[in-house]
Amino acid sequence: MKKFFMISAALLATGAAFAQEAAAETAVAGDSMHRVLMQKFLEGGWEWMLPVLLCLVIGLAVAIERILYLSLSTINTKKFIAKVEEALKNGGINAAKEVCRNERGPIASIYWQGLDRYEQGLDSVEKAVVSYGSVQTGQMESGLSWIGLFIALSPMLGFMGTVVGMIGAFDAIQAAGDISPTLVAGGIKVALLTTLMGLIAAVILQLFYNYIVSKIDSLVNDMEDSSITLMDILTSYSKK
């Protein structure tokens, strides 16, 4: 038994040593990656790399805000509709409106608008649901135009920096009066780094953009289905 504990202790010590070594290597790799990125950023020229970086940062801020907004707008639609229908049967329109008032999201807002116009007739309810559905869709799509702008602007700024860098390389060749491989390679490298940065920013923002669009499409489909269900519920309620 004593030998078993000694072997176990040795294994644990070896595992801890490996874990510490792996953590140290990870930290060194992370620090090395940070240094490489900073070096490439400076080599590309801050006057062109900085605008691309700003496009990426601002675009990500808008995208994250939209994702949080859409996540908070998502509810359990079936459970909500069941609660509204139950409140309508037991307490009438006011009770159903109270359920909508206590629920977040565009579907609850649409239901409240429709129920608020029940006394004016089902035609008014339908018009209110359709109109306010468009308003809610517009609110969900707010900010997408800015993300699209940054997606288009990032590679454009990168290409512009590349063109300016190439012009600078040719000016250096003209001033030297000779084509030096080192001179040309250095100028082209600096020029292409801005294009790389612009393309990376555009790809990252495009992924977020597509996710947000798919989330909006899903919410809009839920809104349309729920609106049809609301009209069916109120039609049945009005016949009683």
Image: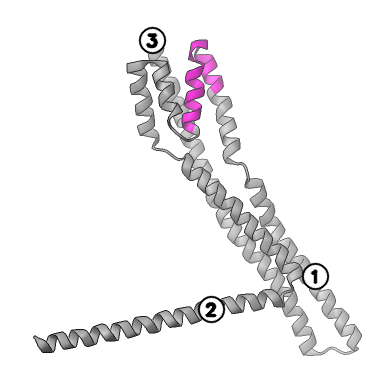
**Quadrant housing the C terminus:** top left
- Tell me the residue at 29%/83% (across/down): 15
Compared to residue 31, the image places residue 140 above or below, namely: above
Tell me: 180 left or right of 80: right
Label 3, residues with CA under 10 Å away: few <14, some 14-19, many ≥20: few
Residue type indicated by callout 3: Lys
Compared to residue 206, the image places residue 16 above or below, namely: below
- Of residues 102 and 127, which is closer to you in this image? 102
The disc, 3 or 1, on the residue closer to the chain's N-terminal end is 1
Residue type indicated by callout 1: Val
Segment colored magenta? 107-128
The disc, 2 or 3, on the residue closer to the chain's N-terminal end is 2
From the top left corner, tell me how far across and down residue 98 is, in percent: 42, 23
Q: Circle 3 sits on which residue? A: 239
Tell me: 208 left or right of 240: right
Q: Secondary structure at mark 3?
A: loop
Residue 31's disc number: 2
Residue 163's disc number: 1
Give the main secondary structure of the magenta stretch. helix
**Quadrant housing the N terminus:** bottom left
Residue type indicated by callout 2: Asp
Q: Secondary structure at mark 2?
A: helix
Return the residue found at the far top. 240
From the top left corner, tell me how far across and down residue 168 is, in percent: 84, 77
